[in-house]
Amino acid sequence: MRNYILKRLFFTLPMMLAISFIAFVLISFIPSDPAEVALRVNEIIPTHEAVASMRESLGLNDPFLVRYVNWLYDCLRLDFGSSYINHNRLVFDEIARSLPATLKLAFFSFVIVIVVSFPIGILSAVFKDSITDKVTRVFMFLFTAIPNYWLGLILMWVFAIHFNLLPTSGATSFAHYILPAITLSMTYVSTYIRLIRNSMLENMQENYLFYARVRGISEGVIVLKHLFTNSLQSTMNALGMSVVQLIAGTFVIENIFAIPGIGRLCISAIFNRDYPIIQAYILMMGLLFVFCNLFVDIVQTYLDPKQRRSM
């Protein structure tokens, strides 16, 4: 198993390098001059001398590959540069300040996905074509079709404005995360109900269920220990990727509910053309995707006895 993990880590390195290169290239090929942007954001007249001085201080006069290597070296030291809006604010500090709110929102959303989708997916499969199953499929369709921002606005109007039960913005208490977490999780709840239901229906055709019933194993044990466990293995990959999708999905939700997280920080950076923050966000999301994919792959391999024995 250790050799397998080391092998997977080795093959992950080129992908990580490619992500860092893409993050650097995307900003480097933006038409506007970063030096001029930095001056305008700080309300400094971009004269020829001022732009030349700023380009020198930002290292923009160096060759492309030199700039990339220097930037990559700084990133390895967790030095993503300074914000263009305020040179006294480090990008790393801005991310560290915003990250806790995003992680809380993603965690609460993930808990909702697990707690809601797993039981409903099991019931929908066990009671196929019943009223419960039909109602579930209708709601699955609705929550998949409704955009997150519409659902967020509807929930905000009903529970925050009309009934005045929950706050509309902020991130200072658990109550502030309830509506955003529900909004963010509903699409994934629908997806995993469908995945678990379909996977369990496929496994219901397997012969081992017949032999389990012949041995006198109760229906509840068959459903939970055999059906659900085997179905879960096929959804593990999607479940791991949903962690990244939930964090990336906060991009919109944080702006609707005014949560001071990474997504809102990136939106602000895009409007203000604060390129170092945008670069760091792209790099962080790309690396998070790679590491989550690696983690899920290792866990799936460990849980599968056939793959584990073949190592």
Image (tube, grey):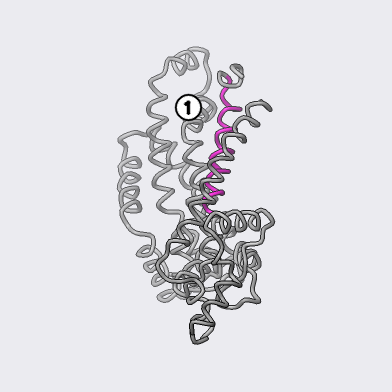
Identify the residue at image location x=54%, y=82%.
Answer: 50
Name the residue nearer the viewer: 97 or 305: 97
Q: Tell me if residue 136 is in the magenta stretch.
A: no
Which quadrant of the figure has residue 292?
top right
Q: Which quarter shows the N terminus?
A: top right
Is 9 situated above or below 92?
A: above
Residue 96, percent from left and from top: 65, 64
Name the residue nearer the viewer: 41 or 116: 41
Identify the residue at image location x=56%, y=76%.
Answer: 54
Is 137 situated above or below 235?
A: below
Tally of numbered discs: 1
Which quadrant of the figure has residue 79?
bottom right
Along the horizontal axis of the image, is 208 left or right of 84? left
Name the residue nearer the viewer: 45 or 85: 45
Residue 94, percent from left and from top: 62, 68
Residue 145, percent from left and from top: 31, 53
Residue 215, percent from left and from top: 52, 13
| Residue type (three-letter) at the residue carrying disc 1 | Leu
- 10 Å neighbourhood of mark 1: few (<14), some, or many (≥20)? many
Identify the residue at image location x=37%, y=33%.
Answer: 198
Q: Tell me if residue 297 is in the magenta stretch.
A: yes
Q: Which quarter shows the C terminus?
A: top right
User: The magenta stretch spans which residues?
Assistant: 285-305
Which quadrant of the figure has residue 295?
top right
Residue position marked by numbered label 1 in the rendering: 227
Most prominent secondary structure in the magenta stretch? helix
Is 25 situated above or below 153?
A: above
**Which SS class for mark 1?**
helix
